[in-house]
Amino acid sequence: MVEKADQIFVLLQHWLVSFLPAAWQHAAAVLLGVVAIIAVYPTLFALAVLMERKGLGRMQNRYGPNRVGPYGILQPVADGIKSLTKEDIVPFRADGLVHFVAPLVLVVAVFMGFAVLPMGRNMVLVDMDASLLFFFAMGASTELSVFMAGWSSRNKYSLLGAMRAVAQMISYEVPLLLSSVVIVMMTGSLSLERMVEAQNHYTGIFPHWFVFTPWGLAGFAMFVIASMAETNRSPFDLPEGESELVAGYFTEYSGFKFALFFLGEYVGMFGIAGLGATLFLGGWSAPFSFLTWVPSWIWFFAKVEIWICFFIWVRGTLPRLRQDQLMNFAWKFVLPMTLVNLVDAAVWRFMGEGWLRWVVCSAIVLAAYVLMGRVGMRREHLGPRSYRYAE
Amino acid sequence: MSFAFWAVTALTVAGGLAAVTLKNLVHCALAVSVAFAGLAMLFLQLDAQFAGFAQILVYIGAVAILVVFAILLTRNADTPKEGGVFSRTWLAGLVVAAAVFAVLGWAVLAGAKGLPNEAAAPAVTVQQIGQALMGRYVLPLEIVALLLTSALIGAVIVAMHEAVNEKGGAK
């Protein structure tokens, strides 16, 4: 019974495919998976947009949208109808073909990333040997679409926003990749399925998730920071800073193309949250050994939703980083920390089992963090905080 | 030589041709990204997963962006070249290109006789690539790392000197 609930989508897929002749069954199974992904993630996107507006509103001491439907639940429906029926304005001097293709490239690249995420036991769309590399390759393609959007609008503000966005995305791509390489090192494989299987063991009631090790925790922190910067989320959202650049590279887009960009950004957030959950939080494995009767796909989506809530929480809390602060942070702090993390993971691996390696590896990570923080701040000449109030 | 192969080849060649014949430089950069994507798909058809995805990650994700930044930061990409995009010595260029292609083709075909006679493409896992890089090819790996480090240091020095010159000029 528990097995059936866990594998319910796989069984459903097999049942639906069994109506077709044997030659078409494999292709039909893959097609069903694709249709399921395309149906599920935009629904989650609608929920995430609602959660964001209500959540941000509450954090900023105001109600979010509360007119459409009870407590504003139907707001995404209203947003969808609005964006579908708005006039599609393309600037006269804009580059027509590139302006049209940019949101398409973004949405396609972002959805391709879901092909390799293991969303439950036996629920990967494509099980490849190098699936992590595939995911990062698709993430890299989104940068090109951002640039295309900004440049084709023939608008100085859009171009500036696009350049900032691309510079930020390139800078944070290196820490993102390096903090995932630690997981690759410890698992010995680039395949996301192997990584989840490596984390699916329990000592007592506690799981072997990588986030519960010193190098895993450091890698997780850096992955969260880099993923917030990759998807242009606050506090790294200067490229689409609403108070600086109108809407950055989105400025000249209206109607459905803007909705596609918005969809692409949020679905990208889901993708990278899914990857982070797979790499560090154990993918579809349950948090305690007595909870393994809950279906695996529930755990995966729960972890993704927790990530999204965390992103929204950080957006409502932290102020925006300036462009040079952002880039300094990436190159001078996060990147050296990821390299130290690699050394740390190697030390862990070669020290053998026991409590000593926990102490040594935690000490290395903490010492590196404190030292680099202090050395980096020495140039800032920050005195004690002083407050001035209006009289 | 399936239909997929011919379709991807057509895409790659079209991208390459567009990259050299379009007037707008940024369009050329985007067309060359399409050619890179076509190459990656050819790698994937040959079951070389690592090479294909690394091609997308490095070429489209970094090299194409670099080309685009270089175009935008150094020249006005809007004005097309006067007198068209073809140079006046195009016949000499064509002859040289054909000669280079002939030499490369001869080298590849002559070397194909020395390959082991395999019916299907070998399935190379990433682990085998890693072991080869760390075992047999470790010297080229280290030399490439040295080359990249020197290029990085050179780039930083060039950028730093410009900042120093600007400050000197402003005073």
Image (cartoon, grey):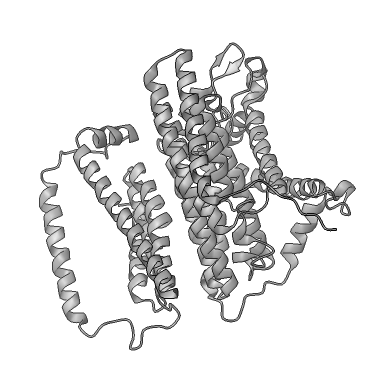
Residue A195 drawn above or below residue A75: above
Q: Residue furthest bottom?
A: B83
Left or right position of A165 against B63: right
- B10 or B151: which is nearer to us? B151
Which residue does the image show at 59% across and 47% down from the upper left? A228
Which quadrant would residue A93 be assigned to in this image? bottom right
Residue B158 drawn above or below residue A60: below
- B62 or A221: which is nearer to us? A221
- A300 or B44: which is nearer to us? A300
Left or right position of A287 against A331: right
Which residue does the image show at 16% across and 79% down from the upper left? B92
Instruction: Please provide percent x and percent y for residue A68.
Output: 87, 54
Which quadrant would residue A44 be assigned to in this image? top right
Q: Is residue B141 visible?
A: yes
Q: Is residue A118 visible?
A: no
Which residue does the image show at 54% across and 33% down from the upper left? A278
Residue A224 drawn above or below residue A235: above
Residue A227 drawn above or below residue B25: above
Which quadrant of the rendered structure holds the C terminus of chain A?
bottom right
**Number of numbered discs:** 0
Which residue does the image show at 27% across and 32% down from the upper left? B131
- B60 or B70: which is nearer to us? B70
Instruction: Please provide percent x and percent y for residue A62.
Output: 85, 50
Which quadrant of the rendered structure holds the N terminus of chain A?
top right
Instruction: Please provide percent x and percent y for residue A136.
Output: 46, 46
Instruction: Please provide percent x and percent y for residue B48.
Output: 32, 43
